[in-house]
Image (cartoon, rainbow, N blue to C red):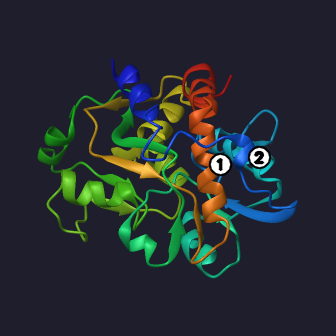
Amino acid sequence: MIKSKLLLAGLLACLLAPVTALADALPDLGGRKVIVVTENAYPPLQFVDVKTGKQIGWEYDAMDEIAKRLNFKVEYQNTSWDAMIQAVSDNQYNIGMTGITIKDDRKEKVDFSDPYMRSQQFMLVRADESRFSDAKSFAAFKDGLIAAQPGTSPFYTAVYNILDGNEQNPRIKLFETFGATVQALKAGDVDVVLTDSVAAQGYVDASNGGLKVVGGPLGSEDFGFIFPKGSDLVAPVNAAIAALKADGTIDALNKKWFLDYKMGE
């Protein structure tokens, strides 16, 4: 049941944008180079395949298709999440992608594309966890610890949706990367990692039975690509996103990465 809810939440992708855009009406960017930065820490959106060492995922496939339709050449680079928004704002990169939630405070630094996906926050725990089963029982479990990256949606969900609204609450343990929060969970250093449905299912599938999801969804969030303020790429990328929604490409990517792909296999 939990897995079904996760998949359904992760598949709520077609939002807000018109569905009348056609591929032949898209702008032609003349083969220009576009530097796209990501973190590779967010399966199945973007990650490094352990068998091949290749960077793969939903966002890579989507961006490659957008580049093809708009006629630009993608150069992928990597940076950490905590540096990404500022680096894009400073024009170090042309586009950022790492399952970035569209938020008003972030819009002060960068421009966002239209949403390409909607997801919801879930509680990722060790498979043998029996001391709590949802957000309410975790809040009452006073020894329980949550791992989060500062300034992220999971951090604010932990503070305001689960705990007491105190951003300095000692029950929240801060880490620099999302991958580090999951490692801390596996090691028993913390008890919960909050993540959206997309990443949660990916980590459960890759854990060989070591992780599970408990409780229901804790709010929802829309994902968008980010750009330096005033970027001339926003409108073309929005047009391409609309085209991908209209012709079923996004539905096909959802099926490939959320239903068919098996992490670690």
Q: Secondary structure at mark 1?
A: helix
Whether 254 is drawn above or below 229: the answer is above
Quadrant in the picture for the C terminus: top right
Q: Are marks 1 and 2 in contact (CB under 8 Å)?
A: yes
Horizontal arrangement in the rendering, residue 156 relative to residue 250 (left or right): left
Identify the residue at horizontal 39%, vertical 64% (top origin): 103
Whether 208 is drawn above or below 131: the answer is above
How far separated are the C-alphas under marks 1 and 2? 7 Å
Foreground of the two, 15 or 193: 15
Using the rendered image of the protein, determine whether residue 236 is visible from the camera's viewpoint: yes
Q: Residues within 10 Å of mark 2 (few under 14, many from 20)?
A: many
Percent of width and height locating residue 147:
38, 54
The residue positioned farthest toward the bottom in the image shown? 90
Quarter holding residue 46: top right
Foreground of the two, 139 or 241: 241
Quarter holding residue 192: top left
Percent of width and height locating residue 183:
51, 47
Horizontal arrangement in the rendering, residue 223 relative to residue 144 (left or right): right
The residue positioned farthest toward the right in the image shown? 31
- Numbered marks: total: 2
Percent of width and height locating residue 77:
76, 62
Identify the residue at horizontal 66%, vertical 27% (top origin): 264
Residue 69 numbered mark, or none: 2
Task: Identify the residue under disc 1.
Answer: 240
Foreground of the two, 36 or 116: 116
**What amino acid type should be assigned to the residue bearing mark 2?**
Arg
Horizontal arrangement in the rendering, residue 218 relative to residue 196 (left or right): left
